[in-house]
Structures are given as C-alpha cells and as structure tokens.
Image: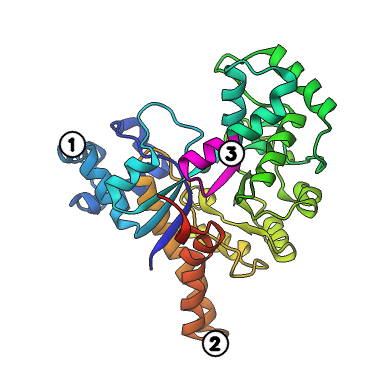
Amino acid sequence: MALVDHHCHGVTTQALDAAGFETPLGLAIRRHCAPVLDLPAHVPAAEYLDRRSALGPAEVTRRFLATTGTTHYCVDTGFRPQGLTSPEELAAVTGARAHTLVRLESVAEALAADGVEPDAFVAGFAQRLEAAARSAGAVGVKSIAAYRVGLDLDPARPTPQEATAAARAWLHRGPAAGGWRLDDPVLTRVTLAAAVQLGLPIQFHIGYGDADIRMHRVDPSLLTGWLHSHRVPVLLLHCWPFQRQASFLAAVHPHVHLDVGLALHYVGPTRAAAVLAEAAELTPFGKLLYSSDAFGLPELYHLAALTFRRALTDLLSARVDAGEWSGADAERIAHLVGAGNAARVYRLAEARG
Ligand SMILES: [Zn+2]
C-alpha cells in the first residue's frame, strides 16, 4: 500500500551518535533498522554505526525512505536547522514527490526581522504568506499556536487597531535569544486570518510536543469556537493524549481531519494499534490521515511507516476477523487512510512538486 506522508520534516545528512542508542528508540533501530542495512536484528550499536558510515548518508537515506512506500511527502519547512534536506532534495533522493507546508510563525518572524512597521504588519503578513505559498507551490500551512499561545483562540479577526497595538508591543519587545519568536495571541489570530483568506489547508500542532507545551492549553476542543467560524480544511496533527477529542471534532465538523503520527513513535509498537483505534473510534474514515512527523534521522521515516502499517493492519483485521467488515471494505479504508484522504485534502494531483 502506497503512503502519503502529510506531515514530515527534512532528513539530516549528519552522523548518528552512540549515545542515541541507549533509549527505546535505539533498541527499535537495532531491531527494525539493522536489516535494512543488511545486518542481523539486534546488532550491537557499534557495528550498526560502522555499517552506517560505510554505506554513507545518501545510500542510508535512500534505503530507509524506499522501505516506507511513500509516494508523496508534505514537508514542514518552518523549522530547519543546518543540514536538513529541502523538499526538492527529498524528492531527488527518494524519487517520490515532495510538497511544501509553510509555517505561519516563521513567515511572521521573518517579517519582523526585516523591520516591518506595526501598522503594516497585517497587510505585510498576508502578502508574505501569499508569496511564500505561491513560490513554493505550497499545499498547506502549519500553525504552532499550541506551542506559543495555546489553542483557546478568539475566532474573531482582530480589528486593525488591536492588530497594530499588538504588533507595536511585540516588535518593541524585540527578538528572543534564539531570534524572533511569535508568541502574541492577537498576532497569532492575524496569521490564521491570513491563512483562512489564502484558503489552503491549515495544520495545527495538537497535544504532545517538547517542554514548551502547556498540556492543558493544547486540547483541540479549545479550538471549537474557531472551527465553528472557519471552513477551510483543518488537520489536527499527532493529537496524543487528545486523540478522542480530535476524533469527536472530526466526526462533527465536515472540514476537520486528524492523524496520530508523532504519537505512534512514542507509544511504541505494542500500544500503537490501541492509540490508532481510539483515534478511529468516531473519526469518519475519510478524515483520518497518515503522517510520520519524521525529523532528521532517516531511520525515523522507516520506523514511522512500519509502526503505522502494523497498527492499521491490526485495527482493520480485528474488524474483518470479527465478521463486522468485509475484506474489500477494510482494503478500501486502508487506502483512504494511507493515501487517498491526504491526496484529496491537499489536492496533490494538481500540486506542483
Ligand atoms: Zn512536525
């Protein structure tokens, strides 16, 4: 079954270090990734690393990404430290198609870095976003409001006075130590209003993330007011531990979709089927998508696809074995979840990339 990976990041060409193996992920790599490099499962870390460097980064990347059966990658280019592949480079190395997702906060931060005047922020942002999406042939945009301000967003578009005052305060405050960081709720609403105007699907980070996440502020049900006010396609990403809330939202709002991509990395293979099953409890089958949320290590793309395929197979075969569904229905649903839904929502047949 071919996959469309509707949210991932670039691949790093940097080497893997030995310390990374002393984790559950390290064990999964020795178990499931070693055979892709022609080594026995559970090979010692040192041998794995030797083989990896003998093959070289390009061959390692090509092998792992080929195992995923991914025909399209939708790449979030907003968070790109040195050495990550661009969508074009990812396409070149895999032979798959790669599309761009524009991160709203990154566009706002670049605008601030270029010295925008507070009263020009709203128009300037809309212009930049449109230009960034057009030049990359973007298939969607991504919001990390969850990380920065939480999801309890006033659905109304800020008035020009509100927006200018917020821009003045934020620009006056200046960049943080790591550079400009959009963390103002009014300006976040400005970025979302421009995204709605643009009309592309909007991905929202939901739930699990790094230490910046305030878990009580990233429950997707906090977006309910916003979802009632806007009708562009919305994709709730990852969602753990709120996959049931996300599932409810997808069931009642025609434009809401979800995945549990990142969550499957962390809950491990034995719980992945259960988490996917919770996400699928209410979600119509036309609304559930696959993402790897892989970032950097080519091994992560391989493990994500493997975990997802197993979890989906477990879920569907349980229903077929129980006599609830026919094999043909299960197969049709597998293709929708693995590829068809993403192809439809992001209009990939018409997309550049
Ligand atoms: Zn991501």
- How packed mark 2 is, by other alpha carbons closer than 10 Å (few <14, some 14-19, many 20 or more), is few
Q: CA distance from mark 2 to mark 1?
A: 49 Å
Question: How many numbered dots are placed on residues in this image?
Answer: 3
Q: Secondary structure at mark 3?
A: helix
3D distance between C-alphas at marks 2 and 3: 50 Å
Q: CA distance from mark 1 to mark 3?
A: 46 Å
Residue span colored magenta: 129-142
Work out whether residue 117 or residue 289 is closer to the camera in this orientation and state it: 117
Residue depicted at 67% across the width and 61% down the height: 247
Is residue 237 at all visible to an observer of this figure? yes
Of the two numbered discs 2 and 1 on the same chain, state the one appearing first in sequence: 1
The residue tagged with tag 2: helix, strand or loop?
A: loop
Front tag of 1 and 3: 3
Task: Tell which residue pokes out farthest to the left in this image.
Answer: 54
Q: Nearer the viewer, mark 2 or mark 3?
A: 3
For label 3, count other residues whose C-alpha is less than 10 Å away and answer few (under 14), some (14-19) or many (20+): some
**Residue at the location (33% across, 47% down)?**
91
Mark 2 highlights which residue? Answer: 323
Q: Which mark is residue 50?
A: 1
Quadrant housing the N terminus:
bottom left
In the rendered structure, which amino acid carries the disc numbered 2? Gly
Apparent side of residue 351 relative to residue 40 in the rendered image (left or right): right
Q: Percent x, y for residue 235?
A: 61, 53
Q: Residue 130's mark? A: 3
